[in-house]
Amino acid sequence: MALIQPSLSSSLRQAKTLVHTLFKLLSATSAKAHSWVSDSALRTWLKQRRSS
């Protein structure tokens, strides 16, 4: 059991790091997508305001 313990904790740490990295990547991507969507929506709205 003493031999398994270190490898288990290290793989747990690796899994935590992986999840953390994925989460950061996902949040950054969603933030970019959100700003892009709101930006394009704002542009569309401005175009409609100008044309009317």
Image: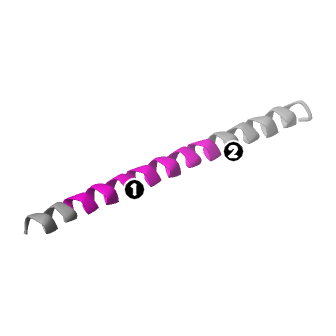
Q: Position of residue 11 (x, y in %)?
A: 74, 35
Element under label 1? helix
Indicate which disc residue 15 carries.
none
Q: Marks 2 and 1, Cα distance to the nearest angstrom?
A: 28 Å
- From the image, which quarter does the N terminus lie in? top right
Three-letter amino acid code at the position of disc 1? Ser
Which of pointers 2 and 1 lies earlier in the amino acid sequence? Answer: 2
Element under label 2? helix
Residue 20 colored in magenta in the image: yes
Q: Position of residue 49 (x, y in %)?
A: 15, 68
Q: Residue at x 74, y 41 (%)?
A: 12
**Nearest the camera: 50 or 20?**
50
Three-letter amino acid code at the position of disc 2? Lys
45 w.r.t. 4: above or below: below
- From the image, which quarter does the C terminus lie in? bottom left
- Which quadrant of the structure image shows residue 43? bottom left
**Nearest the camera: 7 or 3?**
7
Q: Residue at x 8, y 64 (%)?
A: 51
Q: Which residues are magenta?
A: 19-44
Please rate how many residues cluster around mark 1, counting C-alpha atoms within 10 Å: few if below 14, some from 14 to 19, many from 20. Answer: few
Indicate which disc residue 16 carries.
2
